[in-house]
Amino acid sequence: MRYIFSLISFLILASSANAKTFEVNTQHSFVNFELDYMKVSTVKGAFEDFRGVFDWDDQKKELKDIEFVIKSESINTRDAKRDNHLRRKDFFHVKKYPHISFKGTKVISKNQTPIKVIGEVTIKGVKKEMAFDIDWKGLHRDPVDKKKRSLFFEVEGSINRQDFDITWNKALDQGGWVVGEKVDFEIVVEANPTDSRAAFSRFYMKKSDVLPGTTDKESVFGSDNLEKKNFKINDIPKTLVSSEAKGPTPEYGKSLKDIFIGFFLFLALCAAGFFLKKKSLSILETKMGEKKAELLSDFILYALLFVVAVVLAPYMGYSKYFS
């Protein structure tokens, strides 16, 4: 009996060995939406801050365990006044509900190709099961790094915003409403295995760190965070949420204040370096020849400048997260 149990366990492990966890490459992926406006036009927009992970077994052609989180504050319709309104209580109420989330529960395939995903959508604390279409593109080799392959697909669907307690509207004089109820969306995905990063983005994407004792998914979202009712931005590891992170994230160097601080610190330390060179040169010349003293003091100066450049790099817009 013990051997039978061991054999079953081995077969289960072997069957799941080919499944890989993929993380959405946010530099090459998009979350777009559109809805009717005043019955005569269309508002189009996007969410610019999101994260997603899922498992793909290329041997079984099986897609599962899809988890996707959007930071609702990142909405962008190219109109600052409208975007600020969308962030308030009338619409997404981002202070109370900072995230929109999706957790896949079932994937329907046809001819070993995923064609539909069913799962739970949570917006403003309202959770509903919905089904969306998948346009599967499959695995493709990276044109730069032939050893890497990325997954491509698109998810399309529609939701009724009123189902999620987003009910604000105004009546038009000629009849009808300012904002339509139906919201069409399109999510364009390029995803990479969590043990690699895309060639085109290798200088801009930080490879996700797998925390000790956690799965790849837990390293992206935190263990069981998507199950929490009141999901907070702090539940996502800070290295993955640039706008909330402290320290030298890719967004850190974009602050004008940080750039000025780094620039003036660099100038000050350079001046200090040349002062130390002059002092060390006068001391070294008494103990060795003029040429040797000059070479050694130059080496000390350049070594100091190199250390200064590395330390101040995050303030100037560069850091270890870019490599």
Image: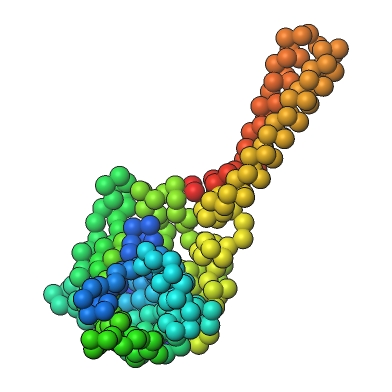
Position of the N terminus, as image quadrant, is bottom left
Q: Is residue 56 above or below residue 173?
A: above
Q: Residue at x 20, y 64 (%)?
A: 137
In the image: residue 18, left or right of residue 245:
left
Residue at the image position 85 percent from the left and 18 percent from the top: 283
User: Which residue corresponds to the image point at 39% horizontal and 76% vertical from the top-left?
Assistant: 67
Seen from the viewer's position, the closer of residues 183 and 251 is 183
- Residue 69 position, x and y percent, is 42, 74
Residue drawn at 73 percent across, 29 percent down: 271
Nearest the viewer among 296 and 230 is: 230
- Left or right: residue 279 versus residue 64 is right
Q: Does residue 233 appear in this view? A: yes
Front in this rendered view, residue 80 or 143: 80
Q: Position of residue 61 (x, y in %)?
A: 23, 71
Q: In the rendered view, does 185 fall on the left or right side of 202? A: left
Q: Nearer the viewer, residue 101 or 94?
A: 94
Would you place residue 135 above or below residue 227 in this image?
A: above
**Residue 252 placement (x, y as % from top left):** 56, 54
Q: For this view, does 158 lie left or right of residue 240?
A: left
